[in-house]
Image (cartoon, helix red, strand yellow):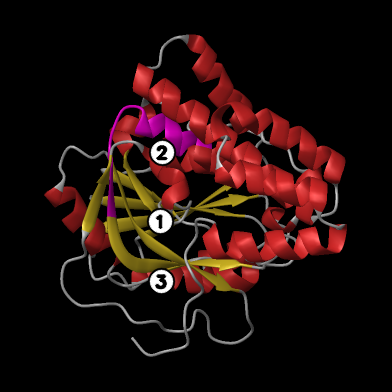
Amino acid sequence: MMFSVVIPLYNKAPYIDSTVQSVLAQDCPDFEVLVIDDGSQDEGAQIVARCTDPRVRLLRQTNAGVAVARNRGIEAARGQWVCFLDADDWLHPRYLSTLIEAQQRHPEAEVVAADFLRVPDAPGPWPPPWPVADGPAPVELIDRLARRWMDGPSLSSSSVAVLRSRLLTLQPCFAPGESLGEDLDLWFRLAEVTPVALAHKPLVAYRVQVAGSLSSSHPSERRYPFLERLRERVRSGRLSRQLLSDTRWLIAQHELSLARETLRAGHRAQALQWLLRAWPGAGGRRWWFTLLILTCMPRRWAERSLHWRERATRPGAPSAPPCTP
């Protein structure tokens, strides 16, 4: 079997059927779907259980978090490659076949991915259609993911497939008990041992602006243990000189982004703390611009200026336009 698509499920009953059906619609039929129900309290697991397609398997566990659910999916997978898909996201029918093409062009890559679109949650049919060009997708081979990360969208938790044999060497792949940044931690650990083959064709719809999601929480309320693990790898002495430099730079960029998020939320003292932590690796125009906004602009102007600046420059794909395929 070529692919195992692992879907952690927790209280996503309104979305899970569409998500599973998007996998079943793939033009590459060599896959299985593993839905790991993480103790849902709604009807999501029952919806999956009613699916009669033999390629769909439902595994249940008491609530232990998304990381544990994904790790269990990796252990139970039968496919050569493991894909990760959130329970409220959606795959274009050509997603899996495009991953095969990317890996065939770069057989040294143990991680393959496709472009994704951030699409706001909305009632009715979702996602809206968008144009996808015919023919092979251009494939970018990324051998320095930490440096590449801030240049534009690369990986999301629903757009990546990893060789299962590699994942088994890294278990637990996702840090148990964490639900914010645990995927980034894995992508960067993988990038230390393998390049990433990224197919530049938007084939994944990543649902955003979902009520109650962790990504909508206030930045001052979040914890980022993956950043501390990155710092531990910097201190470990095991990284090459290039990886050491790239990882330090990546940590500083994340801290600078947190400074901007916190400043937009109106918490200047906390923003200054993040900004000062980011200085060793993020000194440059982005750092100095943030300092200027922090120290010289009234709060309302600062929030507005940073909101516009981040929308114009931050990594991320645009929302899907309402047009036909």
Question: Is label 3 in a helix, a strand or a loop?
Answer: helix
Q: Is residue 138 above or below residue 131?
A: above
**Whole-percent x, y for residue 131 in the image:** 34, 82
Measured in 3D between alpha carbons, the distance from the residue under mark 3 to the one under mark 2, in whole angstroms, is 32 Å
Measured in 3D between alpha carbons, the distance from the residue under mark 1 to the one under mark 3, in whole angstroms, is 13 Å
In magenta, the rendered stretch is 185-198
**Whole-percent x, y for residue 191 in the image:** 36, 34
Asked if one can make out residue 295 in the rendered structure from this viewpoint, the answer is yes
**Whole-percent x, y for residue 320 in the image:** 47, 77
Question: Is label 2 in a helix, a strand or a loop?
Answer: helix
Q: Which residue is mark 2?
A: 147
Residue visible at 39% across and 44% down? Answer: 148
Comes first in the chain, label 3 or label 2:
3
Quarter of the image where one finds residue 276: top right
Say whether residue 257 is left or right of residue 24: right
Question: Is label 1 in a helix, a strand or a loop?
Answer: loop
Q: Which residue is mark 1?
A: 159
Q: Which residue is mark 3?
A: 22
Q: Residues within 10 Å of mark 1 (few under 14, many from 20)?
A: many
Q: Nearer the viewer, mark 1 or mark 3?
A: 1
Say whether residue 225 is left or right of residue 299: left
Residue visible at 56% across and 45% down? Answer: 285
